[in-house]
Amino acid sequence: MKKIYWVLLAGLFLSSRLFAQQSQVGYDEEFVYEVAIDLIDLEKCDCITGALDSLKVKKNAKATLRFNISQLEDDKILQFLQITPPDDKNKVAINNLETQLQAQNFITSKENNGIFCFKVSNKIFERLLNEKKIQKRYVANGCPKIVSGTLLLPLKLRPALNRYGQERPFEFAANISVGPFVGLRWRMSHSRAHFFTIPLFVGLSPVNINSENSASSTNTEDGLETTIVFSTGLVFQFNDFQAGLLVGRDLVGGERGKNWVYNEKTWFSFGIGYKFLGEKDK
């Protein structure tokens, strides 16, 4: 029986995901598009109407150049700050993402009022994204975003203690806790879904209270109680892989909770696993 218990617990631990759901609150992340691989023979067009240049001008977009887009009915207009590689004098300003975000319309050069515009169909644009020839470049400037969602803790590690005449050893407790969280999330990569999050979590968890984990002066009958769980910690996400360490306390009311040796005592929880329900980048 004990062997089956540990097999089930290990399966739950390895297959769990710390965040069942996660969503941003209030706003999307800022980003511009970036050329990942040189784009050849882009067709120059009017930046407003999308009409192709009468001279059929074509240019190449070097990798690392960044651009914004505007949407037509069936096409997208790619608005580049500069098509030729920047010289050393202008490289810092051109490659600084925050500077580009603040410069609405990307007007900094002389030709064509400072914007180079090229038209591609929606279908080609999506293909370039899927082939990773262009990519979104997010702002990763150390400012956190507010996130919320549902947090799942598969187990708790309770330190050894001596309380109410009961001496309890260090133990793994298979007390699944689930509930909502709100927290701060920092982006660690401009292009990849790498984050770390500090959640503030309040949830519920069932615990077994009995004579072995209650005050020795009481005659407590075995039974399940629902605890209110408070927790915080650190959770790291690398694409679809998550790992986290959290610390928290359980709170049980009433006479049984008052005599429970773990009531309001600190525990630890950790988890690693893959996200089985994917989340789209914002």
Image: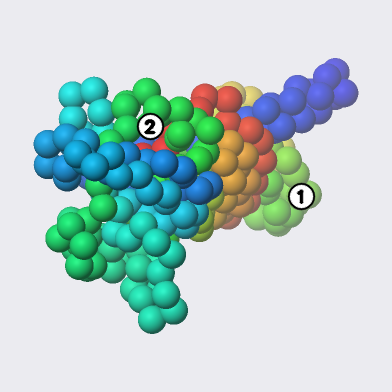
Amino acid bearing label 2: Phe
Left or right, residue 85 beside residue 68? right
Q: In the image, what residue occupies the spot 39% across and 61% down?
A: 84
The quadrant of the rendering that contains the C terminus is top left
Choose between 166 and 203: the one closer to the eye.
203
Disc 1 to disc 2: CB gap under 8 Å: no
Earlier-in-chain disc, 1 versus 2: 2
* Label number found at residue 170: 1
Crowding near pointer 2: few (<14 within 10 Å), some, many (20+)? some
* Quadrant (top left/top right/bottom left/bottom right) for the N terminus: top right
Residue 237 vs residue 160, the one in the foreground: 237
State the CA–CA distance, disc 1 to disc 2: 56 Å
Q: Kindly identify which residue carries mark 2.
A: 125
Q: How many marks?
A: 2
**Residue 265 image point, x, y percent:** 57, 53
Q: Viewer-proximal residue, 30 or 145?
A: 30
Q: Position of residue 61 (x, y in %)?
A: 42, 51
Say what amino acid the circle numbered 1 marks: Phe
